[in-house]
Amino acid sequence: MSLIAIRKRSLTVETVFHEGGPVAATPLRLAAACAVVRNPYAGRYEPDLLPFMAELRALGTLLAEELVATLGRDQVEAYSKAAIVGVNGELEHGAVWHEAGGWAMRQVLGDPKAMVPAAKAVAATGYRLMVPLHNIHASYVRSHYNTFEVGIQDAPRPDEILFALVMATGGRIHSRLGGLTLDQVAVHDGQR
């Protein structure tokens, strides 16, 4: 029997044309794919979460492929992941998404080098979570430090978890604070 029971999914796409300055030549697109699943461990302590984590890889792949289909695989420059655990669960139930969601995005995007940032919380239904993003190949590309809000009005219920993946087609519109730029990434080790 599967540990993954999806109640609902959502896809949110945001297009940014400007941030008060001139209209960008190419708008920034950000998208979040979310899935609300039953928490198989709600209300009890489970010492072995690895089977749940392993099974979540398929969900991660599904959400990552949806984002790539929405934004275009070759257009994705930033990413992140998030989990909101209903109040009958524990933070560790959301932490299973670190490996499952991160692995799925790396596979779908062709093995980018930078770590996948994350946010997670145990919270009441309707909670909104700000998720940090950065460049998929080098964590220190300052222009790509951004955030995106995830959440669903009726989720997660106390015995559910909302899992999310987020991708963006570039850095912040009008980024002008210096630092490492995309054309300066040389080592390609996820750092510099």
Image (cartoon, helix red, strand yellow):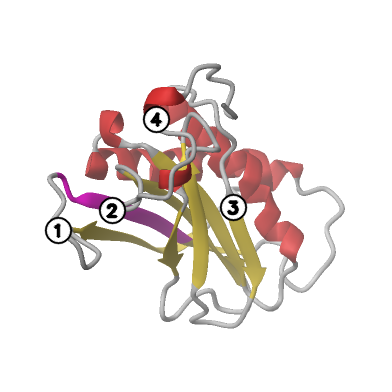
What residue lies at 20% left-to-right and 61% top-to-bottom? Answer: 18
* Mark sitting earlier along the chain (2/1): 1
* Mark sitting earlier along the chain (3/4): 3
Binning the other alpha carbons within 10 Å of mark 1 as few (below 14), some (14 to 19) or many (20 upward) gives few
Q: Residue 160: where, in percent of width, then height?
A: 58, 69
* Mark sitting earlier along the chain (2/3): 3
- Residue at the farthest top position: 187
Binning the other alpha carbons within 10 Å of mark 4 as few (below 14), some (14 to 19) or many (20 upward) gives some
Q: Which callout, 3 or 1, points to the residue nearer the camera?
A: 1
Residue pointed to by mark 1: 22
Q: CA distance from mark 2 to mark 3?
A: 24 Å
Q: Are marks 3 and 1 in contact (CB under 8 Å)?
A: no
Q: Amino acid at mark 3?
A: Ala
Query: In this rendering, is residue 89 above or below 54?
Result: below
Location of the C terminus by quadrant is: top right
Q: CA distance from mark 4 to mark 2?
A: 15 Å
Instruction: Identify the image quadrant of residue 91.
Output: bottom right
Q: CA distance from mark 1 to mark 4?
A: 22 Å
Q: Secondary structure at mark 2?
A: loop
Which span of residues is magenta-colored?
Answer: 26-35
Q: CA distance from mark 2 to mark 1?
A: 8 Å
Q: Amino acid at mark 1?
A: Pro
Q: Residue 42: where, in percent of width, then height?
A: 71, 69
Task: Compare residues 100 and 115 and report the one nearer the observer.
Answer: 115
Residue pointed to by mark 4: 182
In the rendered structure, find residue 123 and report the number of the disc placed on it. none
